[in-house]
Structure formats: structure tokens, C-alpha cells
Image: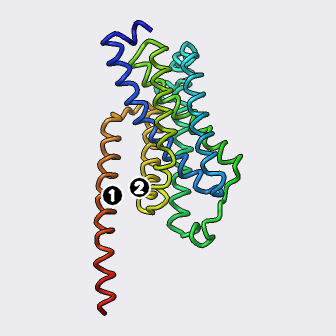
């Protein structure tokens, strides 16, 4: 524990916690959208299970660093492109996320949720399976990024645990906010689609700086939140005009 109590250790720890929280937003968005298709009584339980599994997967990967680093070794080559185990995981995860977000967007545009009266179309088991698959993908991305920042496993574990606790505390509020505002849900699905494309191209060694991506996400979210506030203020004005008429 001496390293974490040093100035360098505290700086690394704080940076890693912040990074894990930012990367964890992807997880929360996906979990919120998936659990939103479950009966209300199962939604909170599914969110807790999903985030808990994400924590366990991340910690397990931290104690398998040698194996994890070994995933960067080339498995085969296609047209001078060296493909590693990590690349295959990123490609598979990207394709799954693109498929899932595109399907959700299609259902939203076709009005299938409204026409079925918001009846859940998933079972608890199938929701957990989907959450586990994305937990694995996001965990690989998160831990591989953490390895580049910190070398001390203790610092990594503590940072991941704190980030997961923050996710657990904020998951219900984020989920409720997403489902109360249809435009935010569509924006969240667009984020997941973009992240899926990012994972896919990353698997083909096209590296896009994540800082630009997350800046675009938070900028778009900020603009939409301002739009929501504007619409709320405009509603009383419209009601007054209707009453006058």
C-alpha cells in the first residue's frame, strides 16, 4: 500500500478512478436500455447483477494480466493485417454492439414499444446474458487502458471497485432519466452505435483517440439537456395559451 500513499500513486489512482467512471458510462447506458425491457420488478435487480458482474469480470482480468497481455500476440495475418486475440474480441464486441443498438433504434422508430404497451420483450436470463457479453467487452477495453496508466495491481483493483460503486449508486438515476426522455434514449442508442463502430475499427488497428469521442458524447448530451429544459419552460406557456382560447 506504500505506492498508493505516495504523490505519484495518488495521482495515478485518481486518474484511473476518473477514467474508469467515464468508461463505465457505456456499461450503464447499455444496462439501462436492456433492463428497460424487463418487468419493473426485475429492472433494479438486473442492474445490480449486471454491474456486480462487471466488477467481478474486471477484477478477474486484473489478476490475469499475463494472459491478458498475451492476447496482443498475433494469431494470424490477413492482407498484411496482423490479427490478435484482443482484435477478435474488439471486432466481435463491436459487431454485437452495432447489431444491438441498431435493433433498438429500429424498434423505437417503428413504434413497437408503444404499440405493445411497453411490455417487456426479454426474460431476466436473456437480459443477464446480453449484459455479461458486453461486460466482458467493456472490461477488456477498460483494463487494457488501465494497464497503460498504472502498473500496480492494487491501485487498479481499488480504482475499479470505487468506479463500480459510483456506477451502482448512479445506475438507477441514469436509467430513470434515459427512460423518461425519449430523445435521450435515442441519443444513448446513438452513443452505443458509435462506440460499437469504434470497437470494430479498433479491432482492425484503426485507432481513434477516445478523448474526441467522449467529448462529442458529452457535448451532445449537454445540448440535449438544454433542449429538455427549454421544452419544459415552453410547456406552461402553451398551456396558458390553450386556456385563453
From the image, tell me which residue sits under label 1. Answer: 224
Quadrant position of residue 75: top right
Q: Are marks 2 and 1 in contact (CB under 8 Å)?
A: yes
Q: Residue at x 41, y 57 (%)?
A: 184
The quadrant of the image that shows the N terminus is: top left
Task: Give residue 89's position: percent from left, percent from top.
Answer: 56, 31
Crowding around mark 2 (Cα neighbors within 10 Å: few <14, some 14 to 19, many 20+) is: some
| Tag shown at residue 6 | none
Q: Secondary structure at mark 1?
A: helix
Viewport quadrant of the C terminus: bottom left
Q: Residue 99 in the image: x percent, y percent?
A: 55, 50
- Residue drawn at the location 44% of the way across and 41% of the way down: 25
Identify which residue is drawn at 57% across, 33% down: 54
> What distance separates the C-alpha of mark 2 from that of mark 1?
9 Å
User: Which type of secondary structure does the marked residue at label 2 adopt?
Assistant: helix
Which one is nearer the viewer's eye here, 201 or 126? 126
> Is 160 rendered above or below residue 122?
above
Tell me: 38 left or right of 95. right
**Percent position (x, y) of residue 22?**
40, 36
**Looking at the image, is 2 positioned above or below residue 223?**
above
* Figure check: 218 above or below 75: below
Q: Dot 1, crowdedness within 10 Å: few (<14), some or many (≥20)?
A: some
Residue 60 occupies quadrant: top right
Q: In which quadrant of the rendered view does residue 243 lie? A: bottom left
Earlier residue among tags 2 and 1: 2
Residue lying at 67% horizontally and 42% vertically, measured from the top left: 129
Q: Which residue is mark 2?
A: 187
Q: In terms of depth relative to the viewer, which is nearer, 48 or 193?
A: 48
Of labels 2 and 1, the one closer to you: 1
From the top left corner, tell me how far across and down residue 110 is, in percent.
54, 69
**How many discs mark residues in the rendered view?**
2
Amino acid at each position: 500500500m506504500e505506492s498508493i500513499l505516495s504523490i505519484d500513486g495518488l495521482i495515478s489512482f485518481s486518474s484511473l478512478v476518473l477514467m474508469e467512471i467515464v468508461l463505465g458510462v457505456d456499461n450503464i447506458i447499455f444496462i439501462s436500455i436492456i433492463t428497460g425491457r424487463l418487468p419493473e420488478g426485475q429492472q433494479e435487480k438486473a442492474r445490480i447483477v449486471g454491474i456486480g458482474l462487471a466488477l467481478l469480470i474486471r477484477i478477474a482480468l486484473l489478476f490475469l494480466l499475463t494472459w491478458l497481455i498475451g492476447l496482443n500476440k498475433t494469431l494470424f495475418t490477413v492482407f498484411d493485417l496482423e490479427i490478435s486475440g484482443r482484435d477478435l474480441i474488439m471486432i466481435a464486441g463491436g459487431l454485437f454492439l452495432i447489431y444491438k443498438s441498431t435493433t433498438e433504434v429500429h424498434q423505437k422508430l417503428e413504434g413497437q414499444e408503444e404499440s405493445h404497451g411497453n411490455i417487456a420483450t426479454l426474460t431476466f436470463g436473456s437480459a443477464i446474458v446480453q449484459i455479461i457479453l458486453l461486460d466482458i467487452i467493456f472490461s477488456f477495453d477498460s483494463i487494457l487502458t488501465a494497464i497503460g496508466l498504472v502498473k500496480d495491481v492494487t491501485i487498479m483493483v481499488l480504482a475499479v471497485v470505487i468506479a463500480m460503486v459510483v456506477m451502482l449508486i448512479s445506475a438507477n438515476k441514469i436509467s430513470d432519466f434515459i427512460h423518461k426522455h425519449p430523445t435521450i434514449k435515442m441519443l444513448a442508442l446513438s452513443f452505443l452505435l458509435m462506440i460499437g463502430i469504434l470497437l470494430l475499427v479498433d479491432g482492425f488497428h484503426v485507432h481513434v483517440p477516445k478523448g474526441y469521442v467522449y467529448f462529442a458524447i458529452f457535448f451532445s448530451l449537454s445540448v440535449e439537456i438544454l433542449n429538455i429544459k427549454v421544452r419544459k419552460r415552453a410547456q406552461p406557456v402553451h398551456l396558458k395559451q390553450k386556456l385563453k382560447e
